[in-house]
Amino acid sequence: MSRRAIELSVLALVLVATILVYVGRRNDWFGTLHFSTSVSVLVIVLMAGGMLWVLARTIQGHPAERRVVFLYIGIAVSLPLFMSLSQTISISPETKELMAGLEPLPPGSKVLVTFDYDPSSAPELQPMAETFFRWAFDRRYKVIVMGLWPQGPQQANMALDLVLADEKYKAMNLQYGTDYVNLGFQSGNEFVIQRIGSDFQSMFRVDFFGTPYDQLPLVKNVKNFSNIDYSFNLSAGYPGTREWVLIAVDRYGLKMGAGNTAVQTTGMYPYVRSGQLLGILGGMNGAAEFEAVTGYLGKGTRFMLSQSFAHMIVIAFIIIGNVAYFRLERKRKK
Amino acid sequence: MRREIPVLITGIAGVVFVVQYFIPHFPFNRLSNWFSDWFSIIAACAIWLGALNLIKISIEKIAYRRHDWGYSIIVVACFLLMVVFGFWAGRDSREPGMPFTWMYDFVYSPLSATMFAILAFFVGSASYRAFRARNLEATLLLLAAFFVMLGRVPVGDVLTGFLPEQFQLSQVAAWIMNFPNSAGQRAIMIGIALGIVSASLRIILGIERSHLGGE
Protein backbone atom coordinates (compact mmCIF):
# COMPACT_ATOMS: atom_id res chain seq x y z
CA MET A 1 0.00 0.00 0.00
CA SER A 2 1.44 3.36 -0.96
CA ARG A 3 2.08 6.09 1.63
CA ARG A 4 -0.59 8.26 0.01
CA ALA A 5 -3.17 5.46 0.33
CA ILE A 6 -2.25 4.95 4.00
CA GLU A 7 -2.64 8.67 4.70
CA LEU A 8 -6.03 8.75 2.97
CA SER A 9 -7.15 5.65 4.88
CA VAL A 10 -6.14 7.21 8.21
CA LEU A 11 -7.93 10.43 7.25
CA ALA A 12 -11.09 8.49 6.33
CA LEU A 13 -10.86 6.55 9.61
CA VAL A 14 -10.48 9.76 11.64
CA LEU A 15 -13.43 11.29 9.79
CA VAL A 16 -15.66 8.29 10.49
CA ALA A 17 -14.53 8.25 14.14
CA THR A 18 -15.26 11.97 14.46
CA ILE A 19 -18.76 11.56 13.01
CA LEU A 20 -19.40 8.59 15.33
CA VAL A 21 -18.20 10.54 18.38
CA TYR A 22 -20.33 13.55 17.39
CA VAL A 23 -23.47 11.43 16.82
CA GLY A 24 -22.66 9.50 19.98
CA ARG A 25 -22.40 12.65 22.05
CA ARG A 26 -25.68 13.98 20.65
CA ASN A 27 -27.42 10.69 21.51
CA ASP A 28 -25.58 10.11 24.80
CA TRP A 29 -24.14 6.75 23.74
CA PHE A 30 -21.01 7.17 25.84
CA GLY A 31 -22.68 8.33 29.03
CA THR A 32 -23.60 4.76 29.90
CA LEU A 33 -20.47 3.05 28.55
CA HIS A 34 -18.37 1.80 31.46
CA PHE A 35 -15.92 -1.04 31.97
CA SER A 36 -16.59 -3.29 34.92
CA THR A 37 -13.93 -3.43 37.64
CA SER A 38 -12.57 -6.75 36.34
CA VAL A 39 -12.30 -5.41 32.77
CA SER A 40 -10.62 -2.26 34.13
CA VAL A 41 -8.07 -4.37 36.02
CA LEU A 42 -7.50 -6.47 32.88
CA VAL A 43 -6.84 -3.32 30.85
CA ILE A 44 -4.34 -2.13 33.48
CA VAL A 45 -2.55 -5.50 33.46
CA LEU A 46 -2.35 -5.42 29.64
CA MET A 47 -0.96 -1.88 29.74
CA ALA A 48 1.64 -2.87 32.35
CA GLY A 49 2.56 -5.91 30.25
CA GLY A 50 2.92 -3.68 27.21
CA MET A 51 5.27 -1.41 29.11
CA LEU A 52 7.39 -4.39 30.18
CA TRP A 53 7.56 -5.46 26.53
CA VAL A 54 8.75 -1.96 25.56
CA LEU A 55 11.34 -2.13 28.38
CA ALA A 56 12.60 -5.53 27.21
CA ARG A 57 12.81 -4.43 23.58
CA THR A 58 14.56 -1.20 24.52
CA ILE A 59 17.14 -3.04 26.64
CA GLN A 60 17.77 -5.40 23.70
CA GLY A 61 18.62 -2.35 21.63
CA HIS A 62 15.34 -2.02 19.74
CA PRO A 63 13.78 1.22 20.98
CA ALA A 64 10.06 1.61 20.44
CA GLU A 65 9.00 3.58 17.41
CA ARG A 66 7.41 6.96 17.90
CA ARG A 67 4.02 5.66 16.79
CA VAL A 68 4.15 2.94 19.50
CA VAL A 69 4.78 5.64 22.13
CA PHE A 70 1.91 7.67 20.71
CA LEU A 71 -0.34 4.61 20.80
CA TYR A 72 0.47 4.03 24.49
CA ILE A 73 -0.27 7.63 25.37
CA GLY A 74 -3.54 7.46 23.41
CA ILE A 75 -4.57 4.29 25.23
CA ALA A 76 -3.48 5.64 28.62
CA VAL A 77 -5.56 8.78 28.16
CA SER A 78 -8.66 7.35 26.52
CA LEU A 79 -9.38 3.96 28.13
CA PRO A 80 -9.39 5.19 31.78
CA LEU A 81 -12.31 7.46 30.82
CA PHE A 82 -14.46 4.32 30.75
CA MET A 83 -13.00 2.61 33.80
CA SER A 84 -15.00 2.26 36.97
CA LEU A 85 -12.20 2.74 39.47
CA SER A 86 -12.43 5.29 42.24
CA GLN A 87 -9.56 7.42 43.52
CA THR A 88 -9.20 9.38 46.72
CA ILE A 89 -8.41 12.99 45.88
CA SER A 90 -6.33 14.67 48.56
CA ILE A 91 -6.89 18.39 49.01
CA SER A 92 -3.82 20.58 48.62
CA PRO A 93 -3.09 23.56 50.93
CA GLU A 94 -3.67 25.95 47.97
CA THR A 95 -7.21 24.65 47.42
CA LYS A 96 -7.87 24.90 51.17
CA GLU A 97 -6.69 28.53 51.05
CA LEU A 98 -9.05 29.22 48.14
CA MET A 99 -11.97 27.80 50.11
CA ALA A 100 -10.94 29.81 53.17
CA GLY A 101 -11.26 32.94 51.02
CA LEU A 102 -14.60 31.91 49.52
CA GLU A 103 -16.47 30.53 52.50
CA PRO A 104 -16.83 33.77 54.53
CA LEU A 105 -18.64 35.56 51.67
CA PRO A 106 -22.25 36.21 52.67
CA PRO A 107 -25.21 35.64 50.28
CA GLY A 108 -25.61 38.53 47.85
CA SER A 109 -21.87 39.12 47.56
CA LYS A 110 -20.80 40.44 44.19
CA VAL A 111 -18.29 38.07 42.63
CA LEU A 112 -16.26 38.93 39.54
CA VAL A 113 -15.33 35.86 37.48
CA THR A 114 -12.79 36.58 34.76
CA PHE A 115 -12.32 34.18 31.87
CA ASP A 116 -8.85 34.61 30.42
CA TYR A 117 -8.50 31.45 28.37
CA ASP A 118 -9.59 29.83 25.13
CA PRO A 119 -10.90 26.35 24.25
CA SER A 120 -7.42 24.80 24.15
CA SER A 121 -7.23 25.14 27.94
CA ALA A 122 -10.89 24.28 28.53
CA PRO A 123 -10.29 20.67 29.68
CA GLU A 124 -8.42 22.04 32.71
CA LEU A 125 -10.28 25.29 33.36
CA GLN A 126 -13.87 24.63 32.28
CA PRO A 127 -14.56 22.19 35.16
CA MET A 128 -13.32 24.88 37.58
CA ALA A 129 -15.68 27.44 36.00
CA GLU A 130 -18.66 25.09 36.20
CA THR A 131 -17.94 24.22 39.83
CA PHE A 132 -17.47 27.87 40.74
CA PHE A 133 -20.82 28.81 39.17
CA ARG A 134 -22.59 26.02 41.07
CA TRP A 135 -20.97 27.14 44.32
CA ALA A 136 -21.83 30.79 43.66
CA PHE A 137 -25.45 30.19 42.67
CA ASP A 138 -26.06 27.88 45.62
CA ARG A 139 -24.86 30.62 47.95
CA ARG A 140 -26.81 33.28 46.14
CA TYR A 141 -23.76 35.26 45.12
CA LYS A 142 -24.23 37.76 42.31
CA VAL A 143 -21.95 36.71 39.48
CA ILE A 144 -20.32 39.19 37.09
CA VAL A 145 -18.44 37.62 34.18
CA MET A 146 -15.90 39.26 31.88
CA GLY A 147 -12.89 38.27 29.78
CA LEU A 148 -9.58 39.68 28.61
CA TRP A 149 -9.34 36.91 26.01
CA PRO A 150 -11.80 37.16 23.08
CA GLN A 151 -12.98 33.57 23.60
CA GLY A 152 -13.31 33.93 27.38
CA PRO A 153 -16.92 35.16 27.59
CA GLN A 154 -17.97 32.44 25.13
CA GLN A 155 -16.39 29.86 27.45
CA ALA A 156 -18.29 31.45 30.33
CA ASN A 157 -21.54 31.07 28.40
CA MET A 158 -20.80 27.40 27.78
CA ALA A 159 -20.29 26.85 31.51
CA LEU A 160 -23.35 28.91 32.42
CA ASP A 161 -25.56 27.07 29.90
CA LEU A 162 -24.46 23.73 31.34
CA VAL A 163 -24.99 24.74 34.95
CA LEU A 164 -28.30 26.53 34.35
CA ALA A 165 -29.68 23.50 32.43
CA ASP A 166 -29.56 21.62 35.75
CA GLU A 167 -33.07 21.22 37.25
CA LYS A 168 -31.80 22.46 40.60
CA TYR A 169 -30.76 25.83 39.18
CA LYS A 170 -33.79 26.06 36.90
CA ALA A 171 -35.91 25.84 40.05
CA MET A 172 -33.96 28.75 41.55
CA ASN A 173 -35.23 30.91 38.67
CA LEU A 174 -31.96 32.80 38.30
CA GLN A 175 -32.37 35.91 36.18
CA TYR A 176 -29.84 37.26 33.71
CA GLY A 177 -28.96 40.84 34.61
CA THR A 178 -30.05 40.40 38.23
CA ASP A 179 -28.32 37.23 39.45
CA TYR A 180 -25.61 36.94 36.84
CA VAL A 181 -24.31 38.95 33.93
CA ASN A 182 -21.76 38.49 31.17
CA LEU A 183 -20.02 41.75 30.33
CA GLY A 184 -18.11 40.19 27.44
CA PHE A 185 -14.62 40.78 26.10
CA GLN A 186 -12.69 44.01 26.11
CA SER A 187 -9.41 44.49 24.29
CA GLY A 188 -6.54 46.22 26.05
CA ASN A 189 -5.10 43.54 28.35
CA GLU A 190 -3.85 44.99 31.66
CA PHE A 191 -5.06 48.45 30.70
CA VAL A 192 -8.61 47.12 30.98
CA ILE A 193 -7.90 45.99 34.55
CA GLN A 194 -6.41 49.38 35.35
CA ARG A 195 -9.35 51.22 33.82
CA ILE A 196 -12.10 49.20 35.50
CA GLY A 197 -10.26 49.82 38.75
CA SER A 198 -11.63 53.35 38.51
CA ASP A 199 -14.66 52.89 36.25
CA PHE A 200 -16.23 49.63 35.04
CA GLN A 201 -18.63 51.30 32.66
CA SER A 202 -15.88 53.01 30.70
CA MET A 203 -14.72 49.61 29.46
CA PHE A 204 -18.09 47.89 29.23
CA ARG A 205 -20.68 50.24 27.72
CA VAL A 206 -22.79 47.19 26.80
CA ASP A 207 -22.76 43.57 27.94
CA PHE A 208 -22.08 40.46 25.85
CA PHE A 209 -25.58 40.59 24.34
CA GLY A 210 -25.60 44.34 23.69
CA THR A 211 -27.63 45.45 26.71
CA PRO A 212 -26.48 48.88 27.95
CA TYR A 213 -24.58 48.76 31.27
CA ASP A 214 -27.11 51.07 32.98
CA GLN A 215 -29.96 48.72 32.19
CA LEU A 216 -28.38 45.78 34.02
CA PRO A 217 -29.62 45.90 37.63
CA LEU A 218 -26.74 43.76 38.91
CA VAL A 219 -23.99 46.08 37.74
CA LYS A 220 -25.56 49.51 37.42
CA ASN A 221 -24.27 50.38 40.90
CA VAL A 222 -20.90 48.71 40.36
CA LYS A 223 -18.52 51.59 39.78
CA ASN A 224 -15.13 49.97 40.42
CA PHE A 225 -13.36 47.23 42.36
CA SER A 226 -14.53 48.65 45.68
CA ASN A 227 -18.00 47.31 44.79
CA ILE A 228 -16.68 43.80 44.15
CA ASP A 229 -16.45 41.45 47.14
CA TYR A 230 -14.35 38.72 45.57
CA SER A 231 -12.79 37.87 42.25
CA PHE A 232 -12.02 34.47 40.73
CA ASN A 233 -9.64 34.48 37.79
CA LEU A 234 -9.42 31.60 35.34
CA SER A 235 -6.27 32.01 33.32
CA ALA A 236 -4.17 30.21 30.74
CA GLY A 237 -1.49 32.81 30.05
CA TYR A 238 -1.19 36.48 29.17
CA PRO A 239 -3.17 38.49 30.10
CA GLY A 240 -4.13 36.52 33.15
CA THR A 241 -3.62 35.95 36.84
CA ARG A 242 -0.26 37.74 37.02
CA GLU A 243 -1.70 40.96 35.54
CA TRP A 244 -4.75 40.78 37.82
CA VAL A 245 -2.51 40.36 40.87
CA LEU A 246 -0.17 43.19 39.86
CA ILE A 247 -2.95 45.70 39.21
CA ALA A 248 -6.29 44.67 40.74
CA VAL A 249 -4.92 43.03 43.90
CA ASP A 250 -1.81 45.11 44.64
CA ARG A 251 -3.14 48.47 43.60
CA TYR A 252 -6.88 48.29 44.27
CA GLY A 253 -6.94 45.69 47.06
CA LEU A 254 -9.25 43.24 45.30
CA LYS A 255 -9.59 39.86 47.04
CA MET A 256 -8.75 37.22 44.48
CA GLY A 257 -8.44 33.48 44.06
CA ALA A 258 -7.42 31.83 40.82
CA GLY A 259 -7.62 28.72 38.70
CA ASN A 260 -4.74 28.20 36.30
CA THR A 261 -3.52 25.67 33.80
CA ALA A 262 -0.99 23.29 35.36
CA VAL A 263 1.82 24.82 33.30
CA GLN A 264 1.08 28.33 34.53
CA THR A 265 0.46 27.42 38.17
CA THR A 266 4.15 26.99 39.02
CA GLY A 267 4.75 30.69 38.30
CA MET A 268 1.92 31.77 40.61
CA TYR A 269 3.15 30.09 43.78
CA PRO A 270 5.08 33.17 45.00
CA TYR A 271 1.82 35.17 44.92
CA VAL A 272 0.05 32.49 46.95
CA ARG A 273 2.87 32.32 49.48
CA SER A 274 2.89 36.11 49.87
CA GLY A 275 -0.88 36.18 50.41
CA GLN A 276 -1.58 38.25 47.30
CA LEU A 277 -3.56 35.35 45.86
CA LEU A 278 -6.09 33.72 48.16
CA GLY A 279 -5.38 30.20 46.96
CA ILE A 280 -4.96 28.67 43.54
CA LEU A 281 -6.33 25.67 41.67
CA GLY A 282 -3.66 24.10 39.48
CA GLY A 283 -4.69 22.24 36.33
CA MET A 284 -7.10 19.36 36.21
CA ASN A 285 -5.92 18.17 39.61
CA GLY A 286 -6.95 21.55 41.02
CA ALA A 287 -10.34 21.22 39.32
CA ALA A 288 -10.81 17.76 40.82
CA GLU A 289 -9.80 19.06 44.28
CA PHE A 290 -12.24 21.97 43.93
CA GLU A 291 -15.02 19.56 42.97
CA ALA A 292 -14.15 17.27 45.87
CA VAL A 293 -14.07 20.03 48.45
CA THR A 294 -17.32 21.65 47.24
CA GLY A 295 -19.10 18.36 46.63
CA TYR A 296 -19.98 19.07 42.99
CA LEU A 297 -18.28 16.11 41.36
CA GLY A 298 -17.88 16.63 37.63
CA LYS A 299 -15.48 16.41 34.71
CA GLY A 300 -12.39 17.22 36.80
CA THR A 301 -12.92 14.19 39.04
CA ARG A 302 -13.92 11.98 36.12
CA PHE A 303 -10.84 12.85 34.06
CA MET A 304 -8.36 12.45 36.92
CA LEU A 305 -8.05 8.71 36.30
CA SER A 306 -6.90 9.52 32.76
CA GLN A 307 -4.48 12.07 34.14
CA SER A 308 -3.10 9.51 36.61
CA PHE A 309 -2.56 6.96 33.86
CA ALA A 310 -0.99 9.50 31.50
CA HIS A 311 1.45 10.62 34.23
CA MET A 312 2.36 7.02 35.06
CA ILE A 313 2.98 6.17 31.41
CA VAL A 314 5.21 9.24 30.98
CA ILE A 315 7.15 8.29 34.15
CA ALA A 316 7.45 4.73 32.87
CA PHE A 317 8.82 5.98 29.54
CA ILE A 318 11.35 8.18 31.36
CA ILE A 319 12.51 5.19 33.42
CA ILE A 320 12.70 2.87 30.39
CA GLY A 321 14.58 5.49 28.36
CA ASN A 322 17.10 6.02 31.16
CA VAL A 323 17.59 2.30 31.82
CA ALA A 324 18.39 1.82 28.14
CA TYR A 325 20.65 4.90 28.15
CA PHE A 326 22.75 3.70 31.11
CA ARG A 327 23.03 0.17 29.74
CA LEU A 328 24.22 1.56 26.42
CA GLU A 329 26.70 3.87 28.19
CA ARG A 330 28.08 0.93 30.19
CA LYS A 331 28.51 -1.10 27.01
CA ARG A 332 30.35 1.76 25.32
CA LYS A 333 32.75 2.12 28.28
CA LYS A 334 33.54 -1.62 28.12
CA MET B 1 9.39 63.97 12.75
CA ARG B 2 8.51 60.34 12.01
CA ARG B 3 10.66 59.37 14.97
CA GLU B 4 10.42 62.40 17.25
CA ILE B 5 6.62 62.40 17.60
CA PRO B 6 6.31 58.69 18.55
CA VAL B 7 9.22 59.10 20.99
CA LEU B 8 7.46 62.13 22.53
CA ILE B 9 4.13 60.27 22.84
CA THR B 10 5.91 57.26 24.39
CA GLY B 11 7.78 59.49 26.83
CA ILE B 12 4.70 61.43 27.95
CA ALA B 13 2.53 58.29 28.30
CA GLY B 14 5.29 56.49 30.19
CA VAL B 15 5.89 59.35 32.63
CA VAL B 16 2.14 59.79 33.23
CA PHE B 17 1.70 56.09 34.02
CA VAL B 18 4.65 56.09 36.41
CA VAL B 19 3.56 59.29 38.20
CA GLN B 20 -0.14 58.39 38.48
CA TYR B 21 0.82 55.18 40.33
CA PHE B 22 2.25 57.30 43.15
CA ILE B 23 -0.04 60.34 42.76
CA PRO B 24 -3.47 59.03 41.77
CA HIS B 25 -5.03 62.51 41.69
CA PHE B 26 -5.92 65.13 39.09
CA PRO B 27 -4.50 65.60 36.47
CA PHE B 28 -2.53 62.32 36.47
CA ASN B 29 -5.52 60.06 37.13
CA ARG B 30 -7.48 61.73 34.31
CA LEU B 31 -4.53 61.45 31.93
CA SER B 32 -3.99 57.81 32.90
CA ASN B 33 -7.66 56.98 32.20
CA TRP B 34 -7.43 58.84 28.92
CA PHE B 35 -4.36 56.90 27.81
CA SER B 36 -5.92 53.60 28.96
CA ASP B 37 -9.01 54.30 26.84
CA TRP B 38 -6.78 55.07 23.89
CA PHE B 39 -4.84 51.88 24.43
CA SER B 40 -8.08 49.84 24.34
CA ILE B 41 -9.13 51.58 21.10
CA ILE B 42 -5.73 50.95 19.50
CA ALA B 43 -5.77 47.32 20.70
CA ALA B 44 -9.22 46.83 19.13
CA CYS B 45 -7.92 48.31 15.86
CA ALA B 46 -4.90 46.01 16.08
CA ILE B 47 -7.26 43.00 16.12
CA TRP B 48 -8.77 44.23 12.84
CA LEU B 49 -5.30 44.89 11.47
CA GLY B 50 -4.23 41.37 12.39
CA ALA B 51 -7.29 39.82 10.75
CA LEU B 52 -6.85 41.85 7.56
CA ASN B 53 -3.15 41.03 7.48
CA LEU B 54 -3.93 37.32 7.78
CA ILE B 55 -6.34 37.56 4.85
CA LYS B 56 -3.83 39.55 2.76
CA ILE B 57 -1.02 37.03 3.37
CA SER B 58 -3.32 34.06 2.72
CA ILE B 59 -4.71 35.51 -0.52
CA GLU B 60 -1.19 36.31 -1.74
CA LYS B 61 -0.15 32.74 -0.96
CA ILE B 62 -3.09 31.38 -2.97
CA ALA B 63 -2.56 33.82 -5.86
CA TYR B 64 1.15 32.94 -6.24
CA ARG B 65 0.63 29.21 -5.48
CA ARG B 66 3.22 29.30 -2.70
CA HIS B 67 4.13 26.27 -0.56
CA ASP B 68 1.04 24.73 1.15
CA TRP B 69 -1.28 27.24 -0.52
CA GLY B 70 -4.15 24.77 -0.15
CA TYR B 71 -4.23 25.42 3.61
CA SER B 72 -4.62 29.13 2.92
CA ILE B 73 -7.86 28.40 1.04
CA ILE B 74 -9.17 26.76 4.22
CA VAL B 75 -8.03 29.76 6.29
CA VAL B 76 -9.79 32.26 4.02
CA ALA B 77 -12.93 30.12 3.68
CA CYS B 78 -13.24 29.59 7.46
CA PHE B 79 -12.53 33.25 8.16
CA LEU B 80 -15.22 34.41 5.74
CA LEU B 81 -17.67 31.80 6.99
CA MET B 82 -17.30 32.96 10.61
CA VAL B 83 -17.54 36.61 9.56
CA VAL B 84 -20.77 35.89 7.65
CA PHE B 85 -22.22 33.89 10.56
CA GLY B 86 -21.18 36.62 12.98
CA PHE B 87 -22.57 39.57 11.07
CA TRP B 88 -25.61 37.76 9.65
CA ALA B 89 -27.51 37.58 12.95
CA GLY B 90 -25.76 40.50 14.67
CA ARG B 91 -25.78 40.27 18.47
CA ASP B 92 -28.17 37.30 18.25
CA SER B 93 -25.40 35.27 16.63
CA ARG B 94 -24.12 34.51 20.13
CA GLU B 95 -27.39 32.92 21.23
CA PRO B 96 -27.35 29.12 21.67
CA GLY B 97 -28.19 27.24 18.48
CA MET B 98 -27.15 30.03 16.13
CA PRO B 99 -24.58 29.06 13.43
CA PHE B 100 -21.81 31.19 14.98
CA THR B 101 -22.26 29.57 18.40
CA TRP B 102 -22.61 26.14 16.81
CA MET B 103 -19.34 26.59 14.93
CA TYR B 104 -17.64 27.78 18.12
CA ASP B 105 -19.00 24.95 20.29
CA PHE B 106 -18.68 22.05 17.87
CA VAL B 107 -15.87 23.00 15.48
CA TYR B 108 -13.54 25.61 16.96
CA SER B 109 -13.57 24.30 20.56
CA PRO B 110 -12.86 20.62 19.76
CA LEU B 111 -10.23 21.53 17.14
CA SER B 112 -8.50 23.92 19.49
CA ALA B 113 -8.56 21.41 22.35
CA THR B 114 -7.27 18.71 19.98
CA MET B 115 -4.30 20.83 18.94
CA PHE B 116 -3.37 21.34 22.58
CA ALA B 117 -3.97 17.67 23.42
CA ILE B 118 -1.40 16.62 20.81
CA LEU B 119 1.16 18.00 23.25
CA ALA B 120 0.62 14.94 25.47
CA PHE B 121 1.90 12.69 22.68
CA PHE B 122 5.00 14.78 22.14
CA VAL B 123 5.68 14.90 25.89
CA GLY B 124 5.40 11.09 25.97
CA SER B 125 7.75 10.71 23.03
CA ALA B 126 10.24 13.25 24.43
CA SER B 127 10.23 11.60 27.85
CA TYR B 128 11.20 8.29 26.22
CA ARG B 129 13.80 9.63 23.81
CA ALA B 130 15.31 12.76 25.30
CA PHE B 131 14.78 13.05 29.07
CA ARG B 132 18.08 11.57 30.31
CA ALA B 133 19.95 11.88 33.60
CA ARG B 134 23.14 12.91 31.80
CA ASN B 135 24.47 15.22 34.54
CA LEU B 136 23.63 16.53 38.02
CA GLU B 137 21.27 19.30 36.80
CA ALA B 138 19.36 16.94 34.50
CA THR B 139 19.13 14.37 37.31
CA LEU B 140 17.71 16.96 39.72
CA LEU B 141 15.20 18.06 37.09
CA LEU B 142 14.27 14.47 36.42
CA LEU B 143 13.78 13.71 40.12
CA ALA B 144 11.64 16.84 40.58
CA ALA B 145 9.55 15.84 37.55
CA PHE B 146 9.18 12.33 38.95
CA PHE B 147 7.92 13.51 42.35
CA VAL B 148 5.71 16.33 41.06
CA MET B 149 4.14 14.31 38.24
CA LEU B 150 3.22 11.45 40.54
CA GLY B 151 2.46 13.68 43.53
CA ARG B 152 -0.01 15.83 41.60
CA VAL B 153 -2.27 12.88 40.77
CA PRO B 154 -4.13 10.65 43.24
CA VAL B 155 -2.17 7.57 42.23
CA GLY B 156 0.91 9.08 43.91
CA ASP B 157 -0.61 8.69 47.36
CA VAL B 158 -1.83 5.21 46.48
CA LEU B 159 1.75 4.17 45.66
CA THR B 160 3.15 5.69 48.87
CA GLY B 161 0.17 5.06 51.14
CA PHE B 162 2.31 2.88 53.44
CA LEU B 163 4.62 5.81 54.32
CA PRO B 164 3.96 8.44 57.04
CA GLU B 165 1.78 11.28 55.70
CA GLN B 166 4.61 13.83 55.40
CA PHE B 167 6.55 11.48 53.12
CA GLN B 168 3.68 10.66 50.79
CA LEU B 169 4.13 11.85 47.22
CA SER B 170 1.45 14.57 47.35
CA GLN B 171 3.26 16.14 50.34
CA VAL B 172 6.66 15.86 48.64
CA ALA B 173 5.20 17.48 45.48
CA ALA B 174 3.64 20.26 47.60
CA TRP B 175 7.00 20.90 49.28
CA ILE B 176 8.81 21.08 45.92
CA MET B 177 6.20 23.51 44.57
CA ASN B 178 6.12 25.69 47.68
CA PHE B 179 9.83 25.96 48.42
CA PRO B 180 12.36 25.22 45.64
CA ASN B 181 9.85 26.22 42.93
CA SER B 182 8.68 29.40 44.69
CA ALA B 183 12.26 30.43 45.42
CA GLY B 184 13.27 29.92 41.79
CA GLN B 185 10.18 31.70 40.50
CA ARG B 186 10.82 34.68 42.81
CA ALA B 187 14.39 34.93 41.56
CA ILE B 188 13.15 34.88 37.97
CA MET B 189 10.46 37.48 38.76
CA ILE B 190 12.94 39.85 40.40
CA GLY B 191 15.31 39.47 37.45
CA ILE B 192 12.52 40.13 34.96
CA ALA B 193 11.25 43.11 36.95
CA LEU B 194 14.69 44.71 37.00
CA GLY B 195 15.01 44.08 33.28
CA ILE B 196 11.59 45.62 32.63
CA VAL B 197 12.46 48.71 34.70
CA SER B 198 15.69 49.32 32.80
CA ALA B 199 14.11 48.59 29.38
CA SER B 200 11.11 50.85 30.21
CA LEU B 201 13.38 53.69 31.28
CA ARG B 202 15.37 53.40 28.08
CA ILE B 203 12.14 53.50 26.02
CA ILE B 204 10.57 56.37 28.00
CA LEU B 205 13.75 58.44 27.74
CA GLY B 206 14.00 57.72 24.01
CA ILE B 207 17.35 55.91 24.27
CA GLU B 208 15.87 52.66 22.99
CA ARG B 209 14.06 53.20 19.68
CA SER B 210 14.04 49.74 18.11
CA HIS B 211 10.25 49.46 18.67
CA LEU B 212 9.81 52.26 16.13
CA GLY B 213 11.39 50.13 13.42
CA GLY B 214 14.61 50.62 11.52
CA GLU B 215 17.96 50.73 13.33
Image (cartoon, rainbow, N blue to C red):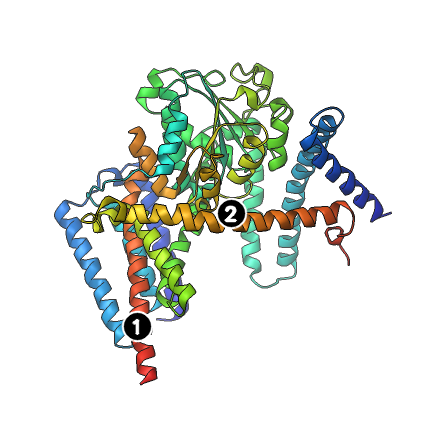
Chain letter behind tag 1 = A
Residue B124, percent across and down? 36, 59
Query: Which amino acid does the dot numbered 1 rest on?
Result: Ala
Determine which of the numbered discs, if any, sits on residue A308 in the image.
none
Q: Secondary structure at mark 1?
A: helix
Task: Tell me whether the residue at label 2 lies in contact with that at label 1, contact meaning CB atoms closer than 8 angstroms.
Answer: no
Q: Nearer the viewer, residue B136 or A307?
A: B136
Query: Which amino acid does the dot numbered 2 rest on?
Result: Arg
Residue picked out by circle 1:
A324
Instruction: Please tell me which residue is depicted at 63% across the width and 35% down the height of the picture.
Output: A191
Residue picked out by circle 2:
B186
Q: Quadrant of residue A206?
A: top right
Residue B58, percent across and down? 62, 53
Residue A247, percent across and down? 58, 34
Count of residue discs? 2
Residue A46 shown left or right of residue A317 in the figure = left
Q: CA distance from mark 2 to mark 1?
A: 37 Å
Q: Quadrant of residue A127?
A: top left
Chain letter behind tag 2 = B
Q: Residues within 10 Å of mark 1 (few under 14, many from 20)?
A: many
Q: Residues within 10 Å of mark 2 (few under 14, many from 20)?
A: some
